[in-house]
Amino acid sequence: MRKGKISNIQKKYLTYTLLLLALTILLSSAGVWLFMRRNMTEVIVDNYEFMNEKMGMALDYLYNRSDETTAECILDDAVQESLKSRELEEVEKNALSKYFAYLELEDIEEYCYVDNKKNVYTKSYSKISYEDFRESGLEDALAGTYAETKWFLARDTLFGTGEEALFIGRYVRNMEYSHEPGMIFFKMNDQFLERVIETQSGTEEDVAIGIIDKNGNFFMENYPENFQLEERDKEKILSLTKREDSGVILTRYKGEGGILQAYRQQESGMVIFTLVPNKILDRGLNQIFLVLAGIYAIVTLIAVAVSLYFSRIFTKPIQMISREMTSFDGKDFSHTISLHTDTELDQIGESYNKMLGNIERLLTEIKKQEKELRVSEMNMLISQIKPHFLYNTLDTIYMLARINGEKTTMKMIQALSGYLRLSLSKGGDMVTVEDELDNVKNYLEIQKIRNEDLFSYEISCQPEVENRWTLKLILQPLAENAIKYGFCDIFEGGLIRIDVRELSGRLTFSVYNNGKPMDKEIAEKINDLGKVPVPEMKKAFPDKQKGYGVINIATRLRLKYGDQVEFGYEVLEEGTRCVIKLPVDGKENYEQ
């Protein structure tokens, strides 16, 4: 490996280090952002919440000033005189018109006073008739009021500008006589409401400020540059016009565009709102993150340098192990590893050296075993002649017995020959049900010849399962146990009944004998073999005499069919029944 080249282990180590560092940076940044955002939001919102309340109080002040001004107009002697039955002289009318021009309420752009005799008083240059006044519709705005000052937004058709403007109107009634009231209207210029915002100098460029009347009309909108009121925030603001309470009616509402607060002026029903945009809430966080980014960049560089340094120390012996293992060709066992790192890597080197020695020994043993295997294969080829010699010998004995007329001997030789042919069956594990039944039948015939009158047997099988495949030599040991242990106390009258059929989709073998019932404790022990691991099954009956020879059957069935096999004994009042249930795979022609 060239000096300075980064190994794969170092790359992975560096990758994991960077991932861990990135996760740490991400979590810490998120924590800082959440903490700082929450605290800065509290400070900013507190400031603008107080500002909104102050603007609401300024709006209260303006309304009170307008109410006081209209009240002063009502109490003026000339105004009261104009409401009497007597028509004013022209000089008195001119004086009354000039009186309204010098009212102390700021930002009155135009005024119009209409007495109860349809006389119209305006500025001297305004030539407005009573018909013009009626067509303006301003009188309709005072409908439903009595003596209160009303603010409303209307299109200016009276003074000819055609623009929407804020009007202040009030009925003017005579204090001494009951006459029709007059009406006074002030058209206010834009500076009138802008005074509310001017009381908060320096903040109006940061937040969105607006005033709406109770009908949802916007009197004034003062938004920061490139700001647009979101539709959901606008709907929330419009819903505030339906409120009946006054003062601060909304605080710290998290809208789509920022934090919203609102103040409602009671008499006019106007709502002044401020919305602190999200970018204002995030202001200052950018500088904090720039500082954090610089710190994280320095930490990352240090972490990379330290990781490379220490990973090179740790990976050098690993690279040595890798190089030696890669270069091993399976022939030269002299290349051992010598490490002195005082770490677990020294143990790995020692284990590798031991492994080389073990491999060398194993190769020597394998060569020896291969030589022995060749000798064994030759012996097996020779031994294959023996079964044929046995069959030929049995056939010769059978012919001699036939010549001599010894039927019993003929029958026994014929059964033995059939039994041996199936048992050997060229080493195959699987046979058809029909062959398995023939095998046990041959065995029973041999036993009947040996034990005359001891027992009889019955074999039944459903025709459709005769060609099904099963593990061979599972019935003969069961029949042998029945004769050996079931009929140990009798001399005649024994019965062995073998039944094979398909039940509930499973190939079911039943072997019954009417001899001595099996001990229940042993039967339960055999039935529990299905829960025992296969390697432990033979340990269940250390004394082979008490296992009834069924351990080998159960073990072979478990090895062949796994957990799909059921094997168990039923202890009856007269005899014992063994039941085996195997899965049916439907293969009619099993390939051995």
Image (cartoon, helix red, strand yellow):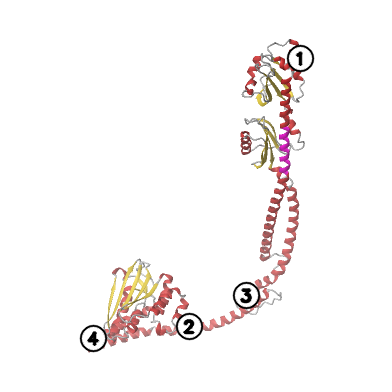
> Residue beneath label 4, please?
407
Q: Are marks 4 and 1 in contact (CB under 8 Å)?
A: no
> On the rendered structure, is 573 left or right of 145?
left
SS for tag 3?
A: loop
What's under tag 4, amino acid-wise? Lys
Q: Earlier in the sequence, mark 3 or mark 4?
A: 3
Residue 394: percent from the left, percent from the top?
A: 30, 86
Tag nearer the camera, 4 or 2: 4
How dense is the environment of label 1, judged by Cα within 10 Å: few (below 14), some, or many (20 and up)?
Answer: few
Residue 95: percent from the left, percent from the top?
A: 76, 14
Count numbered badges in the picture: 4
Look at 75% across and 38% down and name the residue there.
203
Q: Nearer the viewer, residue 72 or 486?
A: 72
Span colored in magenta: 44-59
- Measure the alpha-carbon separation of dots 3 and 2: 30 Å
- Measure the alpha-carbon separation of dots 4 and 1: 162 Å
Q: Earlier in the sequence, mark 1 or mark 2?
A: 1
How dense is the environment of label 2, judged by Cα within 10 Å: few (below 14), some, or many (20 and up)?
Answer: few
SS for tag 4?
A: helix
Q: Are marks 3 and 4 in contact (CB under 8 Å)?
A: no
> On the rendered structure, is 309 left or right of 244?
right
SS for tag 2?
A: helix
Q: Is residue 296 above or below residue 318?
A: above
- Measure the alpha-carbon separation of dots 1 and 2: 142 Å
SS for tag 1?
A: helix
What's under tag 2, amino acid-wise? Arg
Residue 195 occupies quadrant = top right
> Residue beneath label 1, please?
95
